[in-house]
Image (spheres, rainbow, N blue to C red):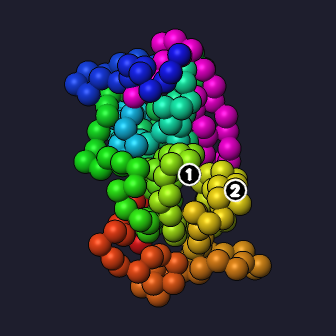
Amino acid sequence: MDVLFSVGCLDAENFKEFKLVQKRQISHNVAKFKFALPTPTSVLGLPIGQHISCRGQDATGEEVIKPYTPTTLDSDIGYFELVIKMYPQGRMSHHFREMKVGDYMSVKGPKGRFKYQPGQVRAFGMIAGGSGITPMFQVTRAILENPNDNTKVHLIYANVTYDDILLLEELDNMAKNYPDRFKIYYVLNQPPEVWDGGVGFVSKEMIQAHCPAPAADIQVLRCGPPP
């Protein structure tokens, strides 16, 4: 079955239920959630650059709806994954913390104004903070895994501490496997003693040094909380 001709499982107007089949703790406050699609050959049907809305309940039982970007693509058939950072007071974080394998998540989408088309720019400059890495990861992975897409990606990824870096192994592997097409520069506000990345907040100088110079065929994407 060719996934290019598969019908996506999402509905932009109505929430649909997807079963949690795996929950893997990555760190003290980060977990990867794997949700099954209706059949082993189903695809989520999420355009590159767009996100989904997840609906849950906070600690008081009130409904919460929040946007998330899967780290999987439609080339990953039969399932989709979310990497979630769970904050102590986060309303949707409570829902994810309480989820157990076999539970269902209500999902609606696609959502978002940005939709990536291969070759639409020569290069991207990307600036991500914290969990804002997930949409950047989605776009970058789609670019690098497409042999017909020559777009280059320059990513600056900022966090408070080294342990806060999401998708570290995956990002480092992409940088190693695609050295001519993907460059990443990590910035930490509280770096370890031995550290060769950036320190503090993302600065104009960092952007000038690690992102492509402004041009008509260059686009800069940013996602994450303000400093």
**Relative side of 107 to 195, left or right:** left
In the picture as drawn, the residue positioned furthest to the bottom comes out as: 205
Question: Quick one: 217 or 86, which is closer to the camera?
Answer: 217
**Relative side of 87 to 68, left or right:** right
Q: Are marks 1 and 2 in contact (CB under 8 Å)?
A: yes
Compared to 115, does 96 lie above or below?
A: above
Whichever of callouts 1 and 2 sits on the residue coming sooner in the sequence is 1
* Badge 1 density bin: few <14, some 14–19, many ≥20, Cα 10 Å: some
Residue numbers of the magenta segment: 21-45
Provide the residue designation for mark 1: 144
Compared to 206, does 167 lie above or below?
A: above
Which SS class for mark 1?
Answer: helix
* Badge 2 density bin: few <14, some 14–19, many ≥20, Cα 10 Å: few
In the picture as drawn, the residue positioned furthest to the left comes out as: 13
Which residue occupies 30% across, 50% down? 114
The answer to whether residue 57 of the structure is visible from this angle is no
Q: Amino acid at mark 1?
A: Leu
Q: Quadrant of residue 17?
A: top left
- Expressed as whole percent of the image width and height from the top left, the position of residue 155 reads 52, 66
Which SS class for mark 2?
Answer: helix
Compared to 134, does 61 lie above or below?
A: above
In the picture as drawn, the residue positioned furthest to the front comes out as: 148
Which residue occupies 70% across, 56% down? 177
Provide the residue designation for mark 2: 177
The answer to whether residue 187 of the structure is visible from this angle is yes
- Expressed as whole percent of the image width and height from the top left, the position of residue 87 reads 50, 49
